[in-house]
Image (spheres, rainbow, N blue to C red):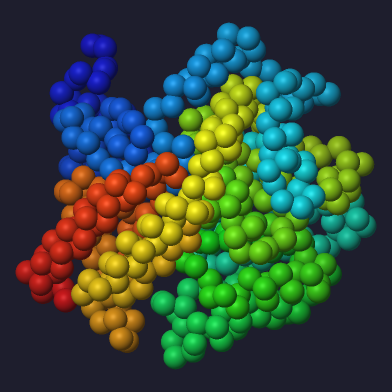
Amino acid sequence: MPAITNHMPTAELQALDSAHHMHPFTNGDELAAKGARVITRAKGVYLTDSEGVEILDGMAGLWCVNIGYGRDELAEVAARQMRELPYYNTFFQTTHVPAIALASKIAELAPGDLNHVFFAAGGSEANDTNIRMVRTYWDAKGKPDKKIIISRKNAYHGSSMGSASLGGMAGMHAQGGMPIPDIHHINQPDWWAEGGDMTPEAFGLARAQELEAAIQDLGEDRVAAFIAEPVQGAGGVIVAPDSYWPEIQRICDKYEILLIADEVITGFGRTGNWFGCQTLNIRPDIMTIAKGLSSGYQPVGGSVVSDEVAKTLGGVEFNHGYTYSGHPVAAAVALENLRILEEEGIVDRVRAETAPYLAEKWHSLGDHPLVGETRIVGMMASLALTPDKASRAKFASDPGTVGYICRERCFANNLIMRHVGDRMVISPPLVITKAEIDTLIDRARRALDECHAQLRERDLL
Ligand code: PMP
């Protein structure tokens, strides 16, 4: 077999890719017919593909490359750590310096008394930890019937059996026998799509009160926890009305329900604070972290838990752990990533300068005929596409048809935006500059114009 390198012609790479590589969330036959885009390099906020085209990455990979691509410091740290101690585990009463240092740093950055970290290799694993941890917590408290975890429809918490069961994605539940028992889903606070004639405030309150109704219905003595993303990411960057989170917090406080904030996307600066729960004034008992923890340079995640939860679990042998829990190379790289985020003032700059600038530009897209709603929190934002703004109408075509066309026009304009149904979303690297934001917005507007023209041509408007 010839060496497979960046220098191979794109068509050959695509043929080998479709012959041997199975892609996540992809129809393999469709991709084989089209050929995957081959990314070969990246620097800052720009990707380069195998044809040499430079593409502005409006998604920071999968919402994760917070410090941007191509930071040598992380490569140096990884190489150093690999030479010194490439692997050891943290089972059986053993530890190592990178795990100690990273856990300590996370405890310092995390709000309140979230001072203890159980490591995983990503968000799905961490949420699986959470399922077992909250149930074990209530066992240890002498309340073994508290097993049910309440989550939300259209939430995304990962792809493993446990985490996808927590998630509320109907398409995922349809495959492979999910959800697992004792997971219950309430409705999401998506006012644009589901709010009907209610005001956003009244709707937010009503959706939060579904949690209280579910607790009363299922029985307070059977509910262990409520899990939610502070801002739904993969569901379409859905920002709850202002009335929602205070009511959720009140309900979790009133009943004995642990609150799990899934901060896999919202953590490490994405919302303009270190954690989304700070932006939204939530006091979780557990936070799920991953992605921005290492800016995606290494696979690492974890569950950050309160003193109370850690103390209660302290008396139990928790029969749970992953070969790569606290992996030394991943931990060392994550620590260096946090140093850069902190010392370069990246989170502060997002909050004070670049997020407000992006917000102003993002909202300016609201005058486009296809754009109904513009939502943004920090550096994550969405546009709801609609044929009629006033009535918040949906397109007559299958959901996602228009979003897909728009995404293709973004690609054609060398911009990566994602579509979730007929919503367009961005989550750029936090280091994006004002000039790069201008480029992003110019390309997005051009893509919207081209999408609009195509919809007319194809009679989809
Ligand atoms: N939780 C949330 C909120 C996520 O957005 C994701 C990934 N998009 C996950 C969990 C799962 O993380 P991973 O893909 O690292 O397993």
With 36 as the anchor, is 112 left or right in this view? Answer: right
Q: Is the residue 137 above or below the residue 57 in the image?
A: below
Q: Quadrant of the C terminus?
A: bottom left
Apparent side of residue 228 relative to residue 371 in the rendered image (left or right): right
Does residue 298 lie above or below 134 as drawn? above
Q: Residue at x 34, y 39 (%)?
A: 45
The residue lying at 57 percent from left, 42 percent from top is 290
Residue placed at 45% from the left, 53% from the top?
353
221, 350: nearer the viewer: 350
**Image spot of residue 333 (x, y percent):** 56, 26
Percent x, y for residue 103? 72, 34
Relative to 122, is 236 above or below? below
* The N terminus, quarter of image: top left
Closer-to-camera residue (48/279): 279
Q: Is residue 286 left or right of residue 151?
A: right
> What residue do we see at 46% from left, 83% from top?
195
* Outermost residue toward the front in this view: 352
* Residue 272 in the image, given as x and y percentages of width and height: 53, 53
Q: Outermost residue, top direction?
A: 83
Q: Could you say which is closer to the camera, residue 351 or residue 4? A: 351
Residue 453 visible? The answer is yes
Location of residue 320 by image quarter: top right
167 horizontally vs 450: left or right: right
Q: Residue 451 in the image: x percent, y percent?
A: 17, 63
Q: How many marks?
A: 0
Q: Please, which residue is most extreme toward the left here?
A: 457
Q: Quadrant of residue 279?
A: bottom right
Is residue 58 visible in the rendered structure shown here? no
